[in-house]
Amino acid sequence: MKCLPVLAVVLFSMTTAYAQNKDIKLTDLKTPNSPGFQILDISPSSVERPTNPQGFSVKVLNLFSSGNGIPKNFSFEFSPFWSFKPKDETVYNYLGIPKEGEKLPPAQILKAPLRKFSISLASAFSDSTSGSSLKNTNYIAVGARTNLLTLRTRGQVENIHADLHNATQIMLKKAAALHGPGGEIIRRPVDEVDKLLEEDEEYQAALAGVQRQPLLLLDVAYAYSNAFADNKYANRRFHKSGFWATLTANAQFKATDHFLSFIVLGRITNDNVLKDTAKLVFEEDRAIDYGGKLEYNLKRFSLSVEYVKRSYNDISAIDTERTVGILQYKISNQLYVMGTYGKNFGNINNVFALLGLNWGFGSSPLKNE
Amino acid sequence: MERTYQIDPSGGDITIEVIVSTRGIAATEVSRRLKGGSYVSIIKSTEPPNANAAGMVTERGIGHSPILKEGKLDIYTIARLVSVPDSDLEQAFEEFTITCILRGGPQGAQPFTLEAAEKERSSSKKLLAGNIRIVLF
């Protein structure tokens, strides 16, 4: 019975996702950091910076199975809000700021968590015992997250208003109508306008200003996972569930591209801990994770260090911690190099190292969203 | 594609309202062409009153019926998607709508909604544009 909610979410997600995107594009693939992946402790980052959820995204796609097992190593995340194709969207609602001289309408304050709400599903197959993962076991998790609070200072909101005003004025100027010989109106082709805007430094500065990080962000997430030994449904057991909150404080160095974030994480998890390795006896124990991440961004570089301590309620002897450093470098708009190195949770095979290229992801990995 | 809106030559003021729905930064310009003349920009959403970055134009007058008769209107909105994940650009283009409402003619309030053929986007998929043209007869 415990699997019914998971199954329902899987079916709903897949149906909605299929309806939204019949073709999965390479540009939808991205290193996963969704709650579904984070609860499995295999995400590149355990302390994730909040971002705008995508309508639908598939990450680390490897849905192939041998034909009689559960699909392995995949992750996808989708945001139901955008499935309803809202007809009254404005940039103010999207950014969560009031119009100039107005207050943010209460309806929009209530809608904001729905707008940022996303559901994720992830699977990770472990072919060796590592950290809290056991050999030949497929872990499947379902998760959800949203943003509860986005706080900007009055000065930040005024700056965004000024940047929005500049940007729109430049847009209309670049798209200015030309008059034909008969007085008819001729518009500049949209690609030509796009090129002119790309080359306009004042416009680009205004766009960057609009996307500046808020002072504070409070995100919450929940995830639940099951383990399937030998990738068989009959061998399923509860693996882990958790609820967590992340509070992000951002600081932009004045008039520079330097950008610093400090993210605090608090998480309560129910963990099915292996008590007897020989007899494979598991026992549920509650654990509290706490820690943080310091992230520094400078143009093409993003450097971060995160630390998370996990304390168990009943058995302090198995308390553990994770310390990971992450470096990202943007080679071009379509190509990123990402390196992760550190120590994962657990005492066995706990070296955490990833080095990879992300390609075709637009500019999102390093952009302040 | 041109639409039509009837004008009563002995009628009063004609007003326009433009409602834009997009996640992007948007700006709208309304241009008017009187009989025998050239197009002239008469309203910009970026200018007071109610200057905004959503491309909205609150209801305001565009002229008296007698002078508008046999004229034309051009409503143009340009929008730039910001912070929209690449995977959502397709959907954001679908969501981009413009509704222009004319009031004051014998037909009363008449909405004109952007048709698929009236909108376009750049190769980057981040710059969107919509253009509604209305003949006043």
Image: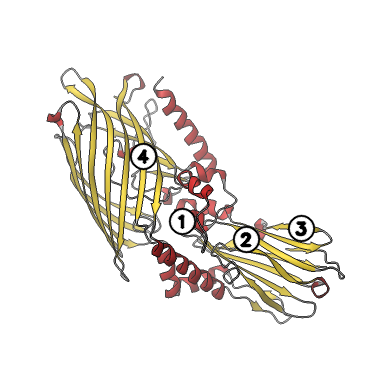
The Cα–Cα distance between marks 1 and 4, rounded to whole angstroms, is 21 Å
Q: Amino acid at mark 3?
A: Ala
Relative to A282, say whether A357 is above or below: below
Compare marks 2 and 3 and give the one earlier in the sequence: 3
Nearest the viewer among A20 and A216 is A216
**Residue at the spot of label 4:** A221
Nearest the viewer among B14 and A74 is B14
The Cα–Cα distance between marks 2 and 4, rounded to whole angstroms, is 38 Å
The Cα–Cα distance between marks 2 and 3, rounded to whole angstroms, is 23 Å
Question: Do marks 1 and 4 share a subunit?
Answer: yes
**Residue at the spot of label 2:** B119
Which circle, 3 or 4, is nearer the viewer?
3
Q: Amino acid at mark 1?
A: Leu
Element on which disc 4 rests: strand
Residue A32: % across, % down: 34, 44
The numbered dot on residue A51 is none
The numbered dot on residue B109 is 3
- Crowd rating for badge 2 (residues with CA inside 10 Å; few <14, some 14–19, many 20+): many
The Cα–Cα distance between marks 3 and 4, rounded to whole angstroms, is 47 Å
Nearest the viewer among A26 and A41 is A41
